Amino acid sequence: MRGHDEETGEFFSPSRSAQRRAALDVLELGEVLVALTATQLGKLPIPDELLPHIRDTQRMSSHGARKRQLAFLAKQMRKLDDAQLDAIRDAMSKDGEAARRDTAMLHRAEVLREALLGDDGDAAMTDLLAQHPQADRQKLRQLVRNTFDERKHNKPPRAFRELFRELRDVLAGGEASADADDGDEDSHD
């Protein structure tokens, strides 16, 4: 029985129907996680204690056994904080914040690549290296030269693509270190 406050009339806890809906939402999330590949799972912020349960469920071939294992997985997932479950849902969502950040980073890498290959490529390289001192200056300059050479000789855009990947990695490394710096500042307060 839920019980309610005598003075305000508010209930102390969610109704059984609300609890059941929340449990079914977690079960659906578990079904989606089990359907993902190992690579896709690696990109999600899944706690380490859940991964063995997900793998066990993926290995089950018998319908009844798989259903029981999925129920057990959902039970383990309900032990997580709501924030952790929301982070997993957000990472899986195409409209989520994580997807928007990734898309924005890809666009920045593309704009940066075009700036490096443009008329004022030296200034763009200087700005990039000033903002991201961890970047490999020699590798970036070599990739830019190779891209120009590919264009000159009408070769396939191998270095052009590799330059994009390198810029994406540099930008991702810069964001990760910026996030770590923000976390360090919070810990000093």
Image: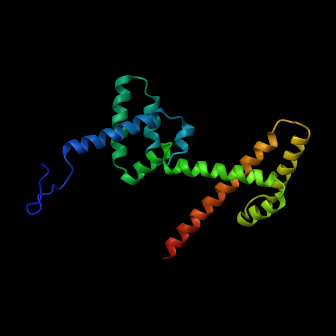
Q: Count the labels in the image.
A: 0
Q: Residue at x 11, y 58 (%)?
A: 9
Residue furthest to the top in view is: 62
Residue 3 x/y as whole percent:
11, 53
Q: Residue at x 51, y 42 (%)?
A: 94
Is 181 in front, or is 55?
181
Is 68 displayed left or right of 16 in the figure? Answer: right
Residue 87 x/y as whole percent:
45, 50
Residue 33 x/y as whole percent:
45, 37
Residue 142 x/y as whole percent:
85, 52
Is 155 in front, or is 12?
155
> Which image quadrant for residue 75?
top left
Rendered image coloring scheme: rainbow
Q: Residue at x 35, y 29 (%)?
A: 67
Is 101 in front, or is 68?
101
Is 24 displayed left or right of 181 in the figure? Answer: left
In the rendered image, the vertical position of residue 116 relative to residue 34, given as above or below: below
Residue furthest to the bottom in view is: 189
Residue furthest to the left in view is: 6
Is 30 in front, or is 25?
25
Q: Residue at x 87, y 36 (%)?
A: 155
Residue furthest to the front in view is: 119
In the rendered image, the vertical position of residue 69 relative to residue 10, given as above or below: above
In the rendered image, the vertical position of residue 28 relative to residue 4, given as above or below: above
